[in-house]
Image: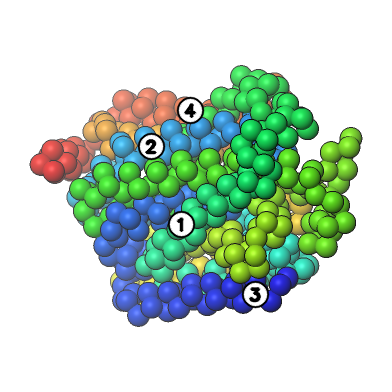
Amino acid sequence: MDMATLITFIVYLVGMLLIGFAAYRLTSNLSDYVLGGRRLGPGVAALSAGASDMSGWLLLGLPGAIYASGLSSAWIGVGLAIGAYLNWQFVAKRLRIYTEVANDSITIPDYLENRFRDHSHILRVISAFVILLFFTFYTSSGMVAGAKLFEASFELSYEQALWIGAIVTISYTFLGGFLAVSWTDFVQGILMFLALVTVPIVAVQELGGWSAATDAVGNIDPAHLNMVQGVGALAIISSLAWGLGYFGQPHILVRFMALRKPQDVKKARFIGMGWMILGLYGAIFTGLFGLAYINTQDISALDSFGVEILNENGVQMLADSEKIFISFSQLLFHPVISGILLAAILSAIMSTIDSQLLVSSSALAEDFYKAIFRKNASERELVWVGRVAVAGIALIAILLAGNPDSSVLSLVSYAWAGFGAAFGPLIILSLFWKGVTRNGALAGMIVGAATVVIWGDFLSGGIFDLYELVPGFFLSAIVTIVVSLVGTPPKEVVENFEAAKHYKAKL
C-alpha cells in the first residue's frame, strides 16, 4: 500500500477513537450508554440509522452481487428502499412515543416487557436471547467484511486482518457507547455517501461515458443489464422480502427511540431516505461497471495492485467479487483519495458492528444481568457490564468469522431474516393494535425466530428456496394474532396504548 494511503487511513482510525473518548466523558449512566439519553438530532439519527443498517453489505456485498450476476441482484435494493420508507413512515414516530410512554423503555426487550406489563420477565429474556443469537451472526459478517478490507489493502493474512479490524471497532464502542456509535456513524455515513457517489462517476468517465460504459457491459454479458432475465418469481419475491426485515432490526429501531422528539421523524426520514436511495444506486453502478472496467485492464497491471484475477471463458473476473469496490479504490484514484475511500469501506463495516455490539451488550446488561441477577445494580456497574459484554460478544463473532471463504451477504441474510421474523410483526402489531397480549407476543416471536432457523438450516429446494424471512414473518404475524384473540390484554395495557395514541394525536 502507498504510504499516503496508509497515513490517510490511520488518521481516520485515530479520529474514530477520539470520538469514542469524547463520548466516554459524556456517558454517566446506562441510558446514556445504550440510548444516548434520547438526544439525537434528525440528521445524526438518520445517517446513523442508515450507516448502521447498510454496513459492509452496501460497499462489498451488493456491488459484489451485481458484479457477479448483474442487475438481477438489484431486487434486494428495491425491497430495502420500500421497507426502509415504510419503517420511517409508520413505525418511527409511534415507537419513539410509545417507548417513552411505556416507562421510558431504553431497549427493545425493555419496551416489550413494559408494553405488555410482563412481570414474569419472560418476554424480556426470550427477546434478549433472540437478539444475542442473531446479532452474533450479524456481527461476524462485519468482521468478515473488515478482514477482507484489511487483507486486500495491507497485504495481511486473513487472520491478522480480522483481529486488527475488530480491535479498532471494539475500542470506541467499549469506551463511548451509544453516543460514540451515533457520532461515528454520522461521520461514517457521510464518507460512505461520498464514496458511493464518486466511484461509479469516475468509473463511467474512465470507460468513455454512460453509453460506452453500458455498451461495454452488454458486450461482455447482455444478461447483466436485464433485471428479470434468468430470475424466477421465487427469487424476486425473496429479494423484495428483504424490506420486511426493517420492522424488526433492533439496531435501527433504537435510533427511532433515541430521537430528541417525535416531531424530528419527518426531517430524519427525508435525510435518511435520500441518503439510502443514492447510496443504493452508487453500489449497483459500482458493481455493474466494475465488470467492464476490469476487462479493460491488463492482467499484469492488476497483479501489481494485488488484485487477483480469474479468466473465465475469455472474461476477466475478480477472484472475490465482493472486493470490486476495494479494487476500484486502488485502481482509479490518487493514494490520498484511495485512503479516504478505503476508510469509507471501513466506515460502513464499523458503523454496523458497533451498533450490533451495543444492542447486544444492552441486552446482556439491562435485560439479563439487571432483570434477573442484580436488580439493584448501580448505573456505573451496568455500564461496565455492558462494556465487558461488548468485548465478549465481539470475541465470539471473531471466532465465527474465522473462515476466509465466508460470504458477507449470506451471513447478513440469515441474521436479517431472524430479526425481521422474530420482531417485525410484533413491533407493528404492538404499535397499531391494542388487542395484542403477552402470550401472543411471546408465541409470535418464538415462531418467527424458529421458522428462520428451521427453514434456513434444514430445508432446501423447491418452494423452500424462498427466503426464510417470508414464511417466518407471516407465520409470526398469524400466531401473534391468533393467540392474542384467545386472551384479553389487561386493562392497564389497554390504557397505556390509548395514552400513547392520545400523545401522538396531540403532536
CA–CA distance in space, label 2 to label 3:
40 Å
- Residue 350 in the image: state x and y as whole percent: 54, 62
Q: Point out the tag, 1 or 3, that comes first from the N-terminus.
A: 3
Q: Under tag 1, what secondary structure?
A: helix
CA–CA distance in space, label 3 to label 4:
54 Å
Residue drawn at x 37%, y 74% as measured from the top left: 23
Q: Which residue is mark 2?
A: 85
Query: What amino acid does circle 4 point to?
Result: Leu
**Residue 256 vertical placement versus 451 (above, below):** below
CA–CA distance in space, label 1 to label 3:
23 Å
Q: Which residue is mark 1?
A: 189
Q: Nearer the viewer, residue 485 or 417?
A: 417
Q: Under tag 4, what secondary structure?
A: helix
| Mark in front: 1 vs 2 | 1
| Mark in front: 4 vs 2 | 2
Residue drawn at x 51%, y 32% as measured from the top left: 78
Q: Point out the tag, 1 or 4, that comes first from the N-terminus.
A: 1
